Amino acid sequence: MKVTLTGEKLIKFIKEYFGIEVVDVQTLEGYANLNFRIKDVEERSYVYKSFQHADDLLFFESETEVLNKLTKKFPDKFPKPIPAINGAYIVKQVQGNDKTNNRILSWLEGDLLKDVQHNQQLFRSFGEFLASMDKEFLEINDPVIKARHIEWDIQHFLDLRSKSKSISDPSLRKLADYYFLQYKEFVLPELPYLRKSIIHNDANDWNVLIQDGKVSGLIDFGDMVYAPLIQELAIAISYAMFEKNDPLKWAAYIISGYHDILPLEEKELELLYYLIAARLCTSVILSSEGIQNNPENEYLLVSQKPTWDLLNKWIAISPDMAERKFKEAAGIRVPEKSDIQKDLEKRHQFVSKSLSVSYTKPIKMKRAAFQYMFDADGNTFLDAYNNIPHVGHQHPKVVEAGQKQIALLNTNTRYVYDQLAEYAEKLLAKFPSPLNKIFFVNSGSAASDLAIRMAQTYTSKQNML
């Protein structure tokens, strides 16, 4: 990004158009625009923003209207737009071929959420703050924001699928690919039925301000969109759980505070686990892509490590356990825990006991992901027995290949089709040349049985060791 105004030129520009006599300028971190903290002769602070995307001018005007409504209802909790001398809130500036839109906002005092000690009271206040803001958002109707489509809007998470290749490490990339499939399976069909509203869409730990142990303000409304209401909470929780040993406990504090002000619906809480994962994946995908295009921008990497750390914790959490904890935090009744004895009685009623059950205390399994299996009550088990010698459970490439083939053709070896011979050819290429035929079987037991019968046929003997 080009810097069009710095130093004396910037001070002169602000004086000329906004009538503010600037005595100090400090550069602030920014993702897609230039940000400065400026001070006037009376030591009052402001935020000066410069944007180089002229296409966003309509959004800036909508953002100004939203901020004016919020600051009228909640003074000193949100940035207040400062008008220029001519009354405009956006001032265009042209320097050669370089054009920018410029604005000034009030400065909000407070410490950033990322820099303070976290506790239950603080996180409950975070939920309460977001809910109070979102109740006001529900009353605002803005066609420009409604029509907006940005990459950071996780209702469009699947649009990023082609960009996951920007994650160079395949062991990390598979996490993003896994959650793309989970989103498609569980979230996408429910999107049309979720409550929608204008939302802030970026309540991360760099944008949330703290005073006296409570959330006191929220800045940076540049990612506002019209989206599922629960998306607001998913994004806030995603960043709040960074570096937490028990992420669900901390998420519950925020949910509890939010629900007290703006009650959540059951379906919203059922999808929250997947929406949090979608935000985390969005963050690492876009920052990975951004750092490839702009390797000198260290700001793009500030959340990469904690995001990956959290994603590795998240994959080990059952969606059912997360849903249970989220609903408990909102005071919503959760299902009774499974009765394994009843499940065993039903199994033995219809299935032979010759199919044995593992463990003295059997486990009722419901889900799995890579090296983890999850029981019906949401407990996590590290699996070292089933498919782990291969690629683990529900590997996205395996699932996708299976879904694609079953949707096209699912039959047996008695018919002629390309995949059978092609797979056999590729598999035989991995073995010594004397091995030139393949028998397809459906289990290890079937393979052993076939091998015994082949040996008996070849040797004409029946005894075996």
Image (tube, helix red, strand yellow):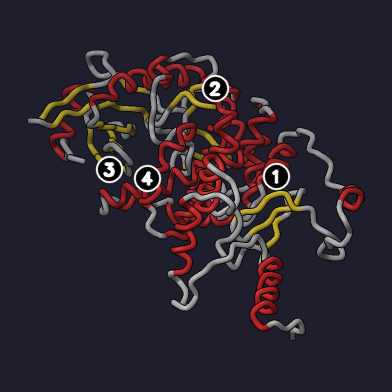
Residue 249 placed where, x, y %? 67, 48
**Can you see residue 115?**
no
What whole-number distance in Å separates the C-alpha atoms at marks 3 and 2? Answer: 38 Å
Residue 242 placed where, x, y %? 53, 51
Is residue 413 found left or right of 147 in the rendered image? right
* Residue that lies at the very extreme toward the left in this rendered image: 96
Q: In the rendered structure, which disc, 1 or 4, sits on the residue that comes first in sequence?
A: 4
Report which quarter residue 254 is drawn in: top right
Which label sits on residue 26? Answer: 3
Q: Nearer the viewer, mark 1 or mark 3?
A: 1
SS at circle 4: helix
Closer to the camera, 71 or 95? 95
- Other-residue count near label 4 (Cα within 10 Å), few / some / many at <14 / 14–19 / ≥20: some
Residue drawn at (43%, 15%) of the image: 142
Q: Nearer the viewer, mark 1 or mark 4?
A: 4
Up-down: is 193 above or below 242?
Answer: above
Which label sits on residue 163? Answer: 4
Up-down: is 50 above or below 319?
Answer: above
Q: Which quadrant: the C terminus?
A: bottom right
What whole-number distance in Å separates the C-alpha atoms at marks 4 and 2? Answer: 27 Å
Residue 393 placed where, x, y %? 61, 56
Is residue 298 found left or right of 134 in the rendered image? left
